[in-house]
Image (cartoon, helix red, strand yellow):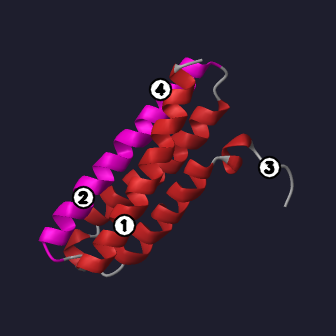
Amino acid sequence: MGFTYSFEKLEAWKESKILSKMVYKFTVTFPDYEKFGLVTQMRRASISVCSNLAEGSSRTSAKDQAHFYQYAYSSLMELLNQIIISTELEFIEETIANQSRDQIEKTSRMINALRNQRLNL
């Protein structure tokens, strides 16, 4: 592998990537009629977290970086909402929902730390 970009060094990005892979794996089991509903939304939200962290890390001003880190956090909360609803609809087992929630909590703390660091510069 060649050059490593700054976002690839962010622990928040690494954790969000783990979450995205989790989402892709557990949404495979959703009913076919949800393929263009919750499945698509959950996958897009999880990828949005990673993507906004990557894009934010490339911005030159701390304010711009914080802005994209806020977008990442918002997508993370969107995903949490979708996981809660999917669990209540019994599309996700409780154990998988709890593992996902733990990963969201871990990732959210890291994103908030990044955002706060940028806002305090």
* Quadrant of residue 46 within the rendered picture: bottom left
**Point 31% across, 47% down: residue:** 77
Q: Is residue 61 visible?
A: yes
The residue pinned by badge 2 equals 82
Report the Cα–Cα distance between label 4 and label 2: 23 Å
In the image, which disc is placed on residue 100? 1
Residue 111 placement (x, y as % from top left): 49, 42
Three-letter residue code for mark 1: Ser
Residue 114 placement (x, y as % from top left): 54, 36
The residue pinned by badge 4 equals 67
Report the Cα–Cα distance between label 2 and label 1: 11 Å
Report the Cα–Cα distance between label 1 and label 4: 25 Å
Q: Which residues are magenta?
A: 61-90
**Point 25% across, 80% down: residue:** 93
Asked whether residue 33 is drawn in magenta, I would say no
In terms of sequence position, does the residue under pointer 4 or pointer 2 come before the other? 4
Image: 117 above or below 54: above
Residue 119 placement (x, y as % from top left): 51, 21
Q: Nearer the observer, disc 1 or disc 4?
A: 1
In terms of sequence position, does the residue under pointer 2 or pointer 1 come before the other? 2
In the image, which disc is placed on residue 4? 3
Per the image, label 3 sits on a secondary structure element best described as: loop
In terms of sequence position, does the residue under pointer 2 or pointer 3 come before the other? 3
Q: Assess whether mark 2 and mark 4 are in contact (beta carbons under 8 angstroms).
A: no
Q: Assess whether mark 1 and mark 2 are in contact (beta carbons under 8 angstroms).
A: no
Three-letter residue code for mark 2: Gln
Three-letter residue code for mark 4: His
Per the image, label 1 sits on a secondary structure element best described as: helix
Query: Which quadrant holds the N terminus?
Result: bottom right
Per the image, label 4 sits on a secondary structure element best described as: helix
Q: Nearer the observer, disc 3 or disc 1?
A: 1
Report the Cα–Cα distance between label 2 and label 3: 33 Å
